[in-house]
Image (cartoon, rainbow, N blue to C red):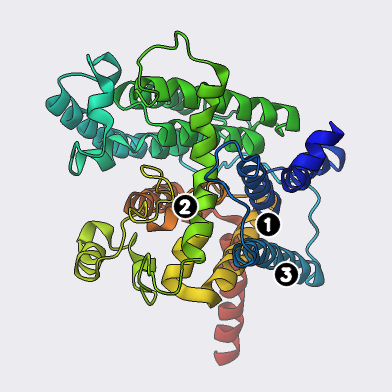
């Protein structure tokens, strides 16, 4: 054990930090899914895995890369701490998550409106079947239909929207939050149906992890606090799911597990994690005479918002900027994803590396603190959605994907329509107070 620690000092420190994130949530009975804890845990455990050096491409990070990584971590934590400090100075007390049934919320309408994105989801599956002949799990050669060379057009955005349905139906599936049995039963059925169809139609790792991750976070807040042991078990299951889907996609060069050694099986998951860090180090420390990507002057930062309007694509085509997965950033051919800090750096340059994480930490913690009061479905939906994306920042920034901005519209509109504005206690008391003031004014004027 000591020799392993001496051979992997960076991984040892990083793993101890990630274990501390688990331990403190258990020992102090704190919420594991708080913004600061999620950011620290996901960043340290993934960089710790990368530093195991299971592949020669993962060389030690250079000082500039360490400055970026630690600077982003410190900035995010500072934003989180500042919100907590400001709210405590205002007298706000944070004891436990304030889960209360939303009696003024129209859960029947919520479930009914959720069928709109479900119908769009089914249209996407229909378009996929028209092109492939069947759901991909039942196709003769699924791997052939899951390459980047196959263009599904806008159908891809529709059949990839299973996680949106999991969020919308999932929030209505818990008895402690939704007291209406009929709406709750339909929501539970639709969650299982959506995840199953999503997996059968297009067995994508991102969609599967998003589905299960969203359910895990919702369960934590709407049913029972998730224990650190269950989180570790979930991570192990995620590795097995990754390997299984890689078999379907034929990423091991064979559609069978026969003769596959454990070292070979784990090589691909390791590369999946580590290549984001070796690519980050590779492009941040580029030689002075080589430019891997031009500075976008903040324009491409807003690509996701204008994705489906073709505006962002026009800029990328005109100036030769990379797409979502940074096609030109490859230390190893075929492994082109990178850490979110690279996207921030090429868009906003050095100040953005520190300012962007700070603003995200500040905003997410402010939203998180709303969970300590009786919260609406809109609050828990957006927090679950955003904290999951932050957990995946070691892989790619979600804000550059147009599909997530479209999901945000559904997550905002549906809960807003279902919230009974007339019955809100705060607004009712405010209206009474205003009525009293107006009555007094009328009597004085009379």
Local secondary structure at mark 1: helix
Q: From what the image shows, is residue 249 above or below residue 96?
A: above
Which residue in the protein does label 3 denote?
Answer: 82
| On screen, residue 239 above or below 326 | above
- At a point 36% along the width and 20% down the height, the residue shown is 248
Mark 1 Cα shell of 10 Å, populated few (<14), some (14-19), many (≥20)? some
Residue 80 in the image: state x and y as whole percent: 69, 63
Which is nearer the eye, 138 or 295?
295
Query: For mark 3, does the 10 Å Cα neighbourhood hold few (<14), some (14 to 19), or many (20 or more) residues?
Result: some
Q: Quarter holding the C terminus?
A: bottom right
Residue topped by disc 2: 338
Q: Give the residue at the far top of this rendering.
A: 258
The image shows residue 317 at horizontal and vertical percentages of 20, 64
Category of crowding for the residue at label 2, using alpha-carbon neighbours closer than 10 angstroms: few (below 14), some (14–19), many (at least 20)? many
Single out the mark in the foreground, 2 or 3: 2
Sequence-wise, the earlier of marks 1 and 3 is: 3
Task: Say if residue 228 shows up in the picture.
Answer: yes
The image quarter in which residue 119 lies: top left
The residue carrying mark 1 is 369
Image spot of residue 332 (x, y percent) = 42, 45
Tell which circle, 2 or 1, labels the residue nearer the N-terminal end.
Answer: 2
């Amino acid at each position: 054990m000591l020799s392993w620690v001496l051979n992997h000092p960076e991984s040892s420190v990083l793993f101890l930090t990630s274990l501390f994130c688990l331990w403190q949530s258990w020992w102090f009975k704190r919420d594991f899914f708080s913004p600061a804890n999620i950011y620290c845990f996901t960043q340290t455990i993934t960089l710790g895995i990368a530093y195991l050096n299971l592949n020669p491409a993962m060389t030690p990070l250079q000082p500039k890369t360490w400055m970026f990584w630690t600077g982003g971590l410190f900035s995010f934590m500072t934003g989180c701490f500042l919100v907590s400090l400001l709210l405590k100075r205002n007298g706000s007390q944070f004891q436990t998550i304030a889960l209360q049934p939303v009696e003024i919320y129209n859960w029947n309408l919520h479930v009914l409106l959720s069928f709109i994105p479900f119908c769009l989801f089914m249209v996407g599956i229909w378009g996929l079947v028209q092109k492939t002949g069947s759901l991909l799990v039942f196709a003769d050669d699924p791997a052939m239909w899951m390459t980047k060379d196959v263009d599904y057009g806008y159908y891809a955005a529709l059949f990839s929207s299973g996680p949106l349905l999991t969020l919308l139906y999932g929030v209505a599936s818990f008895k402690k939050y939704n007291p209406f049995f009929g709406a709750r039963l339909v929501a539970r059925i639709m969650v299982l149906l959506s995840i199953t169809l999503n997996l059968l139609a297009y067995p994508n790792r991102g969609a599967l992890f998003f589905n299960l991750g969203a359910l895990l976070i919702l369960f934590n807040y709407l049913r029972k606090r998730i224990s650190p042991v269950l989180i570790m078990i979930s991570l192990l299951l995620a590795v097995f799911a990754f390997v299984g889907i890689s078999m379907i996609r034929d990423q091991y060069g064979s559609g069978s597990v026969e003769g596959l050694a454990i070292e070979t099986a784990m090589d691909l998951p390791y590369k999946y994690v580590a290549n984001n860090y070796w690519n980050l180090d590779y492009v941040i420390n580029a030689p002075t005479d080589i430019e891997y990507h031009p500075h976008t002057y903040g324009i491409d930062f807003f690509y996701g918002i204008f994705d489906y309007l073709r505006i962002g694509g026009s800029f990328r085509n005109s100036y030769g900027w990379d797409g979502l997965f940074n096609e030109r950033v490859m230390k190893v051919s075929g492994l082109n994803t990178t850490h979110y800090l690279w996207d921030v750096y090429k868009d906003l340059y050095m100040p953005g590396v520190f300012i962007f994480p700070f603003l995200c930490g500040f905003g997410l913690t402010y939203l998180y603190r709303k969970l300590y009061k009786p919260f609406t479905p809109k609050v828990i939906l957006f927090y679950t959605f955003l904290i999951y994306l932050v957990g995946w920042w070691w892989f790619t920034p979600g804000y550059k994907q147009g599909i997530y901005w479209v999901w945000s519209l559904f997550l905002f509109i549906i809960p807003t329509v279902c919230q009974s504005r007339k019955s809100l206690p705060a607004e009712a008391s405010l209206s009474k107070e205003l009525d009293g003031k107006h009555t007094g004014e009328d009597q004085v004027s009379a």
